[in-house]
Image (tube, rainbow, N blue to C red):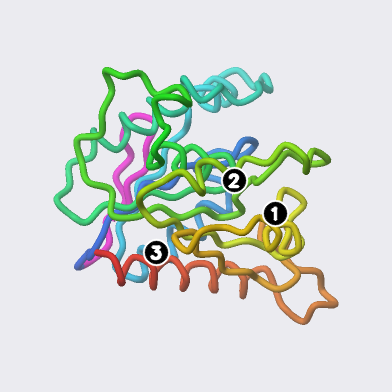
Amino acid sequence: MTNTLTSSIVQHADNAKAMVVLAHGAGADKSHAFMTKIADGLVANSISVCRFNFPYMDKRNDDGKKRPPDRMPKLLPCLAEQINALDTDLPLFIGGKSMGSRVGAILTSNEAVEQGLPEDITLTKVIKGTFCLGYPFHAIGKADKVRLSPVTNRSSDLLIVQGDRDKLGDKNEISGYSLPKHAIVKYLADGDHDLKPRVKSGFTHEQHIAAAIDHIVEYIDQRR
């Protein structure tokens, strides 16, 4: 069953064992095919999912004008408010695609306030875990400006599912970061930033999306 709320789509799984709040990337909204496939796959594994749009994306959809993403002082409280508004007693996890994953990683790190979360906004629910689909370790062409602190400066673990040729952080680059043990990285062979492999790899995008879902389900099952 799917309920549509203000700026949110909540898919309730049968016999749900957990709830995921899933945040979109910078250029595609909550209803993008990638987001929908991940959400549907989790629901099929008895995990309910809440998808939502950040405010800039709602404005973009309303008037058709392209806008850059808001900065963290707007993104972080939006995610926190979505989490706090959920009416659920299920074990709660947060995840996202690219930019959305970075917002989630910051929110559950030790530096959410330093990165822009207002001090008067606190999470009223316990977050059991955080996962990232294509974490943007750096902007394209700016490998010298690495966004490592949300991954390293945290007390809880973090799952990262990454295409091994992702232009925002490929396997060779990530291997050189000396990440702590709480950063669990699962690579998908020949995957790009959308986890999509080339035809010559012998893998398909559907296979990699299914593998990503399997990694998330395993992560949730071990922590709920």
Q: Where is the C terminus found, in terms of image quarters?
A: bottom left
For the record, the magenta segment spans 1-14
Marks 1, 3: nearer the viewer: 1
Q: How crowded is mark 2: few (under 14 residues within 10 Å), some or many (20 or more)?
A: many
Q: Residue furthest bottom?
A: 202
Q: Position of residue 11 (x, y in %)?
A: 32, 52
Q: Residues within 10 Å of mark 1 (few under 14, many from 20)?
A: many
At horizontal 47% and vertical 33% (from top left) the residue drawn is 53
Quadrant of res 78? top left
Q: Residues within 10 Å of mark 3 (few under 14, many from 20)?
A: many
Q: Where is residue 20 in the image (x, y as percent from the top left)?
A: 34, 52
Indicate the amino acid at tag 3: Leu
- The reply to whether the C-beta atoms of the residues labelled 2 and 1 are less than 8 Å apart is yes
The residue tagged with tag 3: helix, strand or loop?
helix
Front residue of this view, candidates 194 and 109: 109
**Is residue 13 covered in magenta?**
yes
Q: Where is residue 56 in the image (x, y as percent from the top left)?
A: 54, 22
Image: 118 above or below 153: above
Indicate the amino acid at tag 2: Ser
From the viewer's perspective, tell me whether residue 36 is left or right of residue 135: left
- The reply to whether the C-beta atoms of the residues labelled 2 and 3 are less than 8 Å apart is no
Distance, label 1 to label 3, CA atoms, is: 20 Å
Distance, label 2 to label 1, CA atoms, is: 8 Å
Q: Name the residue under label 2.
A: 98
Sequence order check, earlier mark of 2 and 3 = 3
Q: Mark 3 points at which residue?
A: 42
